[in-house]
Structure formats: structure tokens, C-alpha cells
Image (spheres, rainbow, N blue to C red):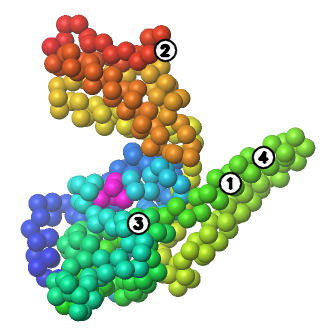
């Protein structure tokens, strides 16, 4: 846990007068959630669970010998799992990259497990006790929790999973050299995995078919949505248990499943991306006005459920960023209007604007 020096630094922070006197943490749950809700769409059930846990973390009444919170994010690619962690890091630390990201794909073979805890005694580098962890970022400070993300957890080797199990149990990771310990007791741990994603897709397709069958036969049980959700959760749980040992799963505080992005949330995601683009262009003395027909085109060409928001981002880059970039080569600054003409994206500069 953070000690006296951290507490002294926390007392010197400029916003000390505005902090909650009942908590040592200076982040505001409402601000974190506002950040999440402005960036993560179609995952309201996940955001609600995160909000609940932030209240517990803020109160600082959890087990002092375990990490503050351990969450596993499941679901298909491109639905916001990693982006959720980035948003939380930005809201708490002011930087979306202020978290330790460990790509478990790099630890897929057993002999790479040393990268997690350092080289064992007798091997080159054992005295240094180095590992892939960023100690200061993970441990955080008295007033701000550390954040770590274990990405693509299912690809990690069994020794790595065992090492994480020890972290979940004790809140500490002792490097193999025995000379250094990384403290996770002031840390929010996030993990992501695509385990069960294929079963989710197969289930979604079969579920759609069954709904049509029910409609055709005019048999519509009131609780068919509940039944579908229960079946889906059972499928995901089975996939999880096939990959990870029960003692590992049992130490996770929340297993949260991100859903496929639906077409109706694409407009919200696109608007958020366009606003980010506006902010970047503003630094170069440009403004943009994007007509609604252009937005519809970007969504039409970018909506692929199996690829999530990443497919939309590719469409945005091709159908909006590229035309704007080409127009910027002709005009030094000003307001650019992006519209659709004869099926093609056209960018024009407002006359009379410097």
C-alpha cells in the first residue's frame, strides 16, 4: 500500500481543497463515468457494473491485502474492452496511456514466463530482477490507484496464469530474484479475452433463426429474451472454465461480457470520432462541417458486426480523413464542408474564410 511519502505528496496537490474528505482518492466517480459514457456505446450493463465498483474503490473499504478490483472483460473484437481501460486511465490520471499494458500474446510460451517475474537465479539478468511491469504506474499513489491491463488473457501460458493467481491472492508479485516486490494492493486490474466470442456469434445467428421460427408459428414466450441471455451466459461460462482453472476464475471480482455493437449505436460512435477529429483539426486552424449524407455513407460502408468499431474507424479514415487531408493540401486554413456529390465525398472550403 502507499506509505507516508505518498500521503505527503497527496496533501500537496493543488486540488486538495476540493477532494472528498471521506476518501483518500481524489478522482470523482461521476467524472469517470461521464468519460466512459461519452466514449463507450452499447455496453450500458458493463458501465453500470464498473460504476458500482468505482464507488467501492472510492470508499476504500475493501480487503487491504488484495488488489482494489479485478475485472475480466469478455466479448468480440472492436466493442470497447481496451477503450474502456483507456477512458478510465484518462479520467483518473489525465492520460489515456497511463496504465501498464501487458500483451499476453507475447507470453504464450512457457519459457517467456520469466518476462513476467524476471529471470530465475543463475540466468543472465537474474540479479537485476527486471520484468515487463512498470512498477510506478502499477502501484499508483496515495491519491490515485494504479491501473494494469492484461490483454488477450487466453493466450498466456499456464505458468503466467499461476503467477497472476498469486497476485490476486496476496496483492503482491515477488520477482524471481527475490530482491524486488511489485505491490498490486493499490491497483485496479483489468483483463481482456476473446474466449467464447465465436460461440457468441454462433449463438446470435441461431437465436435470430429461432426468433423467426417463433414469429412464424406465432409462439412468443414472454421470457424468450431472458432465456436467450441465460443460455448465452452458460455458453460463455463454459468456454471460460475450459480455458482457465476454477481457482483462477474464483478470484476475479467481475466477469463482464461486452455485447456485439448494434447498428443503432454506430451514429453515436461516429459522432464521437468526428468530434475527436475536429479537436485535432482545430490545432491546425481548420474547422469541418460534415453533412448527414456523408455520415450515413461512412456507417453504411463501415458497419460490420464481427469487426465492431474498428471497421467503422477504417471507413472514417477512407471516406472522411483522406478527403480532408487532400483538401488541406490546397487550403492553408479555414472551414471545410464535407458533402456527398454523385456518390462521392467532396470537400469544399467556405469562401471568405481566412
Circle 3 is placed at which residue position? 105
Whether 155 is among the magenta residues is no
Whether tag 3 and tag 2 are in contact, CB under 8 A, the answer is no
Q: Magenta region: which residues?
A: 85-89
Task: Answer yes or no: is residue 54 visible.
Answer: no
Residue 125 falls left or right of residue 229: left
The residue that mark 1 highlights is 202
Comparing marks 1 and 4, which lies closer to the viewer? 1
At 33% from the left and 26% from the top, the residue drawn is: 322
Instruction: Give the quarter of the figure containing the C terminus.
Output: top left
Give the mark nearer the N terminus: 1 vs 3. 3
Viewport quadrant of the N terminus = bottom left
Q: Nearer the viewer, residue 148 or 323?
A: 323
Q: Nearer the viewer, residue 88 or 297?
A: 297
Chain-order first, disc 4 or disc 3: 3
- Secondary structure under the numbered disc 1 in the rendered image: helix
Residue at x 21% of width, y 20% of height: 329
Q: Considering only vertical position in the picture, is 44 above or below 194?
A: above
Q: Give coordinates of residue 151: x percent, y percent.
A: 40, 64
In the image, residue 106 above or below residue 229: below
Nearer the N terminus, badge 1 or badge 4? 1
Between the residue at mark 4 and the residue at mark 3, the CA separation in whole angstroms equals 35 Å
Q: CA distance from mark 1 to mark 2?
A: 35 Å
Cα separation, mark 3 vs mark 2, equals 42 Å
First of labels 4, 2 by sequence position: 4
Q: Which residue is mark 4?
A: 209
The image shows residue 269 at horizontal and vertical percentages of 44, 39
Provide residue 2's location: percent of width, then percent of height.
20, 80
| Mark number displayed over residue 343 | 2
Mark sitting on residue 220: none
Can you say whether 81 is above or below 278 in the image? below
- Secondary structure beneath dot 3 equals helix
Amino acid at each position: 500500500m502507499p506509505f507516508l511519502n505518498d500521503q505527503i505528496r497527496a496533501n500537496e496537490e493543488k486540488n486538495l481543497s476540493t477532494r472528498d474528505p471521506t476518501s483518500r482518492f481524489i478522482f470523482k466517480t461521476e467524472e469517470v463515468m461521464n468519460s466512459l459514457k461519452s466514449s463507450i456505446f452499447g455496453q450500458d450493463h458493463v458501465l453500470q457494473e464498473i460504476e458500482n465498483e468505482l464507488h467501492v474503490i472510492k470508499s476504500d473499504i475493501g480487503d487491504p491485502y488484495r488488489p482494489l478490483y479485478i475485472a475480466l472483460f469478455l466479448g468480440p473484437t472492436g466493442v470497447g474492452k481496451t477503450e474502456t481501460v483507456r477512458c478510465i486511465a484518462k479520467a483518473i490520471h489525465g492520460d489515456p496511456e497511463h496504465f501498464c499494458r501487458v500483451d499476453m500474446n507475447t507470453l504464450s510460451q512457457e519459457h517467456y514466463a520469466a518476462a513476467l517475474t524476471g529471470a530465475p537465479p543463475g540466468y543472465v539478468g537474474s540479479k537485476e530482477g527486471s520484468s515487463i511491469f512498470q512498477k510506478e504506474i502499477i502501484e499508483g499513489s496515495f491519491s490515485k490507484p494504479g491501473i494494469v491491463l492484461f490483454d488477450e488473457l487466453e493466450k498466456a501460458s499456464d505458468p503466467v496464469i499461476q503467477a497472476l493467481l498469486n497476485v490476486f491472492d496476496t496483492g503482491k508479485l515477488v520477482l524471481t530474484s527475490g530482491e524486488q516486490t511489485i505491490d498490486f494492493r493499490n491497483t485496479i486490474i483489468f483483463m481482456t479475452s476473446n474466449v467464447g466470442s465465436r460461440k457468441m456469434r454462433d449463438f446470435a445467428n441461431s437465436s435470430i433463426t429461432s426468433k423467426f421460427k417463433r414469429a412464424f408459428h406465432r409462439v412468443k414466450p414472454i421470457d424468450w429474451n431472458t432465456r436467450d441471455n441465460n443460455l448465452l451466459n452458460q455458453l460463455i461460462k463454459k468456454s471460460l472454465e475450459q480455458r482457465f482453472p476454477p481457482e483462477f476464475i474464483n478470484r476475479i471480482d467481475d466477469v463482464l461480457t461486452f455485447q456485439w455493437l448494434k447498428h443503432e449505436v454506430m451514429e453515436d460512435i461516429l459522432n464521437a470520432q468526428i468530434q475527436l477529429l475536429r479537436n485535432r483539426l482545430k490545432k491546425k486552424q481548420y474547422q469541418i462541417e460534415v453533412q448527414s449524407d456523408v455520415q450515413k455513407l461512412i456507417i453504411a460502408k463501415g458497419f460490420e458486426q464481427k469487426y465492431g468499431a474498428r471497421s467503422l474507424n477504417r471507413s472514417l479514415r477512407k471516406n472522411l480523413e483522406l478527403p480532408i487531408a487532400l483538401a488541406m493540401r490546397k487550403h492553408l486554413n479555414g472551414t471545410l464542408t464535407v458533402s456527398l456529390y454523385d456518390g462521392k465525398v467532396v470537400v469544399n472550403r467556405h469562401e471568405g474564410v481566412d
